[in-house]
Amino acid sequence: MQHVIDHTYLCGYTPCHELLDATVAWLLGRGLAVTGVAALVLLLFPTLFVPILRSNVNYFADRRMRQLYNAPYGTNHYGASHPWSEHDDGAFARAEKL
């Protein structure tokens, strides 16, 4: 029973302190640069991604609101059919009557 207790480890087949030593050795070796770059990317990702995402979401929301409420038939329809549009020659005559 003592043999089983002595050779049973919480971290798998190796003792935890050996696993921790191997991880620290890897981080202090070539892994330090990889870890630094990964940390930098994780810190900068929201800074770069969130404004781009927010801009795209705002663009699509504005487009949808214009489609639903401002110009459901398109801006060309409203520009050509409005009484004071620049495409209508009698617009100023109608405006004078108002």
Image: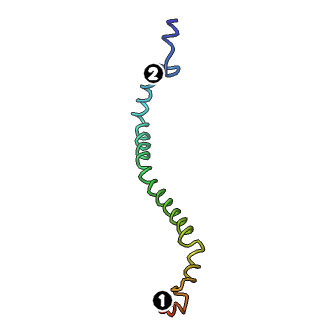
Q: Residue at x 53, y 71 (%)?
A: 70
Q: Nearer the viewer, residue 18 or 77?
A: 77
Q: Residue at x 56, y 68 (%)?
A: 67
Residue 40, how many percent across, how many down?
A: 40, 45
Q: Amino acid at mark 2?
A: Cys
Above or below for 42 versus 29: below
The crowd level at tag 1 (other Cα within 10 Å; few <14, some 14-19, many 20+) is few
First of labels 2, 1 by sequence position: 2
Image quarter of residue 37:
top left
- Residue at the spot of label 2: 16
Q: Is residue 87 left or right of residue 35?
A: right
Image quarter of residue 73:
bottom right
Q: Residue at x 43, y 45 (%)?
A: 42
Colour convention of the picture: rainbow
Above or below for 86 versus 14: below
**What mark, if any, has residue 98 been given in the picture?**
1
Above or below for 74 versus 16: below
Residue 34, how many percent across, how many down?
A: 44, 40
Q: Residue at x 45, y 21 (%)?
A: 16
The crowd level at tag 2 (other Cα within 10 Å; few <14, some 14-19, many 20+) is few
